[in-house]
Image (cartoon, coloured by chain):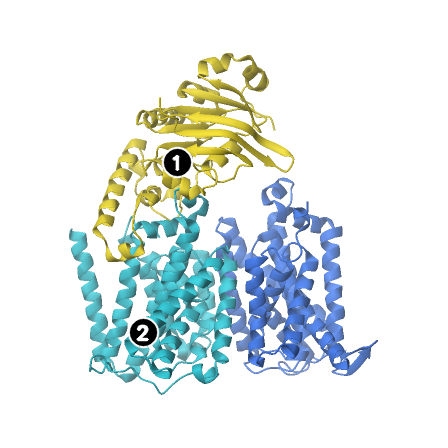
Chain colours: A blue, B yellow, C cyan
């Protein structure tokens, strides 16, 4: 039982990280239809920037409190997203290039960030400090590591704000209007370029924060980006791109299948690596809209 | 008298509670120009999509050349000799003008990939026949001067002519024109009208939907008027313009101006 | 007719140079040259899939690994005659591609890329976990190409085989590209709705292209298997599929000459960049990709465009 509860906490924490990555995709896809595969590398960059701010491993004498690192990493991610949109995506949108061009440009951006991370921070993993250390603790009946509980709490915070943003603010409504009909939204006076830039900034910030949150458990490593990108995308496909909650649901399902499957299914441990891909293929083919439908398609 | 080339019987299409097309009959003979007209929202586009195979009817049949095509996909209808143009020009932007037209010949090539790779003689003959036909249509539509142009630089009117050439290159038996005059200048409309008359003179049946009456009525041999998805008149254009029901439904209250 | 003569002469000259190189290069450069030829063959096929037919798939190296592992396992692990193993490996590639293509080609745009990415990872996991049959992560070695009708195909003659592989790939793809089928593929890429209205069965065209190019990738994989007489999963990794995509974009997508240029330039670039950028040449590629898409969508081949007017990109 203890074992089960521990696995439950660990799977929930992983699911939250996948969910955050899925949310980073989602806030960009909704208004722009662009799949930004670079979010995984942005998460890695977020982790590295966090390590740089928090420890003496990269630059000496920058031992700031963890909360300030969270803010710096979020701002860094937003800046990265905004800059990428401005320099790489906007010119393509302006000349009416197909969406695929933007997606391919972002693959170039992915490579630039991955190589940039290696160049600046080296190829070996860097340990990332956790704000509450690595104490094992019990919350109610649930045993886990403090960082796992922090991830879960922070993720719920991020999703709650995202949900409030989309459901309760004028800007969120503008995002939705653009998602439903770009031309009509433009006629209504919504600045499409502004929405695009904000979407990328928000996606960048969410991805970078996700990277910072997970890094104490995995270390900051230049290879962490691609798995996060594919797992986040799988979570998005499972939950569906229609609704914010779908991203979190998809992330949790993916992590539960991965971790509980690895523990209890009678397959060789190497084969468990295949679970996310089987899920991804299955959902793409048989349930391409994901589990949760977008609000406007509910009749 | 033989059966008409295209026979539509009891064609109905519902979207949820809305009946877009209701129990519609249409006959189209060889070499005939038939205009499908009516105010916006009358069901013209829905009817067009059902006949072109982009949409499936709720009930009713579409028989083309003695064959029930109601459930056939769009590409199969094109292969049977029922081709179309688009209201908003849809060129293949990355291909030359000639190749754009040649795509329309697709279904006339027989043999598989192996024949292609081995360069089968029959294929070479089909290819040169296709190119002759494409050249002839470039001449016919007057696109000769633009044959080396990037298709994305064509004017809207030239793009429309490309649509027509692409739909004719397979020697179809019927051609569906979706608002062919929309967006054209006066001179272009006159040129297009001559081209459409020539097409019909070759024995090809033409079904066109449009709401520009000045374009349609002098050109068409027959017109069908739709209102709220139902046929309210069917006959020669002369009779149509004098039909009180038509005047009330269409000419009377809008005179070509669209109601939203 | 003159054009045809020039064309034939171009082929002859190209083949002459490519075969001649096989006999003059030293052993280090022969190794580089052979791998470059494999990349060119892979790029040609991928260009047809992505550049001509508009399908972005990350499964090209997975199919190369199916071909390579297929022939090595069948002929050396299971002891089948080489000719039979060769044919069977190609058939397995084609069948696998067909089974993948039927559902996958229904996916639009980048969703196909992600589904094929997942498929590639499944192939990778299968090879990693294949035990003695696939050699696991360590791969297979200690096999060699058996004599062909009593003649040992080795040294420059094996390089000639790889030149012929590239020529065969180019020949097939040029033929197909110039045909009604090539036009149908480009039409589906540019405007699926209009292509369908013109009588093109979109699903069929997409499946055929996927199977054809994936089988060609399998053939290139077989060619690779006997370059070093070693195969392991890392050789066919996802990274390589990305690199292949970059080769096409930088070379000029949709044109054979672009694919070949891109493959040669990006394969050789690391050797030139080594002294300047160390092993960060991928950073340079990333920047090039971004610049190419923003400013030169027709790639390096676009620079040659002046010499071939009327030929659409």
Tell me which residue sits at (45%, 13%) in the image. Answer: B238
Residue closer to the observer: C254 or A81? C254
Secondary structure beneath label 2 = helix
Q: Nearer the viewer, residue A68 or B162?
A: B162
The chain identifier of the residue carrying mark 2 reads C
Left or right relative to A13: residue C219: left
Location of residue B39 in the rendering, given as x and y in whole percent from the top left corner: 55, 24
Closest to the observer: A177 or A108?
A: A177
- Report how far apart the C-alphas of labels 2 and 1 lie in the structure: 46 Å
Q: Quadrant of residue B249?
A: top right
Q: Position of residue A278 (x, y in %)?
A: 56, 68
In the image as oriented, which residue stretches furthest toward the right?
A140
Residue B50 visible within the image: yes
In the picture of the structure, the residue carrying the numbered disc 2 is C86
Q: Quadrant of the C terminus of chain B?
A: top right
- Quadrant position of residue B197: top left
Q: Which residue is mark 1?
A: B82
Residue at mark 1: chain? B
């Amino acid at each position: 039982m203890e074992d089960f509860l521990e696995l439950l906490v660990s799977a929930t924490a992983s699911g939250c990280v996948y969910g955050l990555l899925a949310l980073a995709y989602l806030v960009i896809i909704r208004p722009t239809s662009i799949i930004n595969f670079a979010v995984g590398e942005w998460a890695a960059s977020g982790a590295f920037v966090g390590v740089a701010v928090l420890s003496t491993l990269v630059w000496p004498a920058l031992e700031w409190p963890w909360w300030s690192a969270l803010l710096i990493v979020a701002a860094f991610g937003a800046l990265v997203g905004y800059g990428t949109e401005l320099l790489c995506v906007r010119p393509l949108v302006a000349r009416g290039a197909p969406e695929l061009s933007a997606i391919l440009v972002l693959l170039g951006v992915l490579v630039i960030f991955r190589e940039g991370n290696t160049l600046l921070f080296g190829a070996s993993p860097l340990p990332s400090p956790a704000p509450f250390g690595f104490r094992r603790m019990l919350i109610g009946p649930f045993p886990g590591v403090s960082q796992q509980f922090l991830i879960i709490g922070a993720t719920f915070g991020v999703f709650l704000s995202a949900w409030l943003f989309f459901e309760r603010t004028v800007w969120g409504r503008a995002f939705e209007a653009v998602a439903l009909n770009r031309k009509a939204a433009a006629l209504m006076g919504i600045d499409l370029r502004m929405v695009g830039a904000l979407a990328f900034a928000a996606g960048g910030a969410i991805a970078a924060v996700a990277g910072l949150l997970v890094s104490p458990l995995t270390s900051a490593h230049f290879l962490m980006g691609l798995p996060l990108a594919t797992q986040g995308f799988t979570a998005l496909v499972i939950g569906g791109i229609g609704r914010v909650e779908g991203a979190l649901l998809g992330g949790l399902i993916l992590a539960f299948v991965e971790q509980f499957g690895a523990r209890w299914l009678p397959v060789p441990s190497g084969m468990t690596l295949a679970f996310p891909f089987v899920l991804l293929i299955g959902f793409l083919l048989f349930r391409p809209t994901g589990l949760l439908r977008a609000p406007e398609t509910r009749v | 008298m033989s059966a008409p080339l295209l026979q539509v019987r009891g064609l109905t299409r519902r979207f949820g509670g809305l009946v877009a097309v209701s129990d519609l009959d249409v006959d189209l003979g060889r070499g005939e120009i038939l205009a499908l007209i009516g105010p916006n929202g009358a069901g013209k586009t829905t009817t067009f999509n059902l006949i072109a195979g982009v949409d499936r009817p709720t009930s009713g049949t579409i028989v083309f050349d003695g064959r029930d095509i109601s459930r056939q996909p769009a590409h199969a209808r094109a292969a049977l000799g029922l081709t179309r143009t688009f209201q908003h020009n849809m060129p293949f932007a990355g291909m030359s003008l000639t190749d754009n037209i040649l795509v329309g010949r697709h279904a006339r090539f027989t043999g598989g990939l192996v024949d292609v790779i081995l360069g089968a003689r029959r294929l070479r003959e089909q290819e040169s026949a296709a190119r002759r036909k494409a050249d002839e249509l470039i001449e016919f539509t007057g696109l000769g001067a633009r044959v080396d142009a990037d298709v994305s630089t064509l004017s809207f009117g030239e793009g429309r002519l490309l649509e027509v050439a692409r739909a004719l290159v397979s020697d179809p038996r019927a051609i569906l024109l979706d608002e062919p005059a929309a967006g054209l200048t006066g001179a272009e409309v006159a040129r297009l009208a001559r081209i459409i008359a020539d097409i019909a003179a070759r024995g090809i049946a033409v079904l066109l939907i449009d709401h520009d009456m000045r374009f349609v009525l002098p050109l068409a041999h027959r017109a069908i008027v739709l209102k709220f998805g139902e046929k309210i008149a069917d006959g020669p254009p002369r009779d149509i313009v004098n039909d009180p029901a038509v005047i009330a439904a269409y000419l009377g209250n809008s005179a070509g101006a669209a109601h939203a | 007719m003159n054009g045809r003569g020039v064309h034939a002469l171009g082929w002859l000259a190209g083949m002459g140079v490519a075969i001649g190189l096989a006999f003059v290069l030293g052993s280090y450069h022969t190794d580089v040259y052979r791998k470059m030829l494999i990349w060119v063959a892979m790029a040609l096929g991928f260009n047809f899939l992505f550049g001509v037919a508009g399908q972005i798939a990350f499964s090209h190296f997975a199919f190369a690994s199916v071909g390579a592992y297929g022939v090595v396992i069948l002929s050396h692990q299971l002891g089948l005659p080489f000719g039979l193993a060769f044919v069977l490996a190609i058939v397995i590639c084609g069948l696998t591609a067909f089974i993948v293509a039927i559902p996958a080609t229904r996916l639009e745009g980048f969703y196909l890329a992600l589904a094929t990415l997942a498929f590639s990872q499944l192939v990778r996991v299968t090879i990693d976990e294949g035990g003695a049959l696939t050699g696991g992560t360590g791969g297979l070695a200690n096999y060699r190409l058996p004599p062909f009708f009593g003649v040992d195909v080795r040294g420059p003659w094996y390089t000639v085989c790889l030149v012929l592989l590239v020529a065969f790939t180019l020949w097939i793809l040029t033929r197909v590209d110039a045909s009604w089928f090539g036009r149908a593929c480009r039409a589906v890429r540019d405007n699926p709705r209009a292509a369908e209205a013109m009588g093109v069965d979109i699903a069929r065209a997409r499946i055929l292209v996927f199977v054809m190019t994936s089988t060609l990738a399998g053939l290139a994989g077989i060619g690779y298997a006997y370059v070093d007489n070693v195969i392991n999963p890392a050789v066919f990794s996802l990274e390589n599929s990305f690199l292949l995509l970059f080769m096409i974009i930088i070379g000029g997508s949709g044109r054979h000459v672009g694919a070949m240029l891109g493959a040669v330039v990006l394969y050789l670039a690391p050797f030139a960049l080594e002294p300047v950028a160390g092993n960060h040449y991928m950073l340079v590629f990333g920047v090039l990709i971004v610049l190419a898409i923003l400013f030169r969508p027709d790639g390096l081949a676009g620079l040659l465009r002046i010499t071939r007017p009327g030929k659409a990109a």
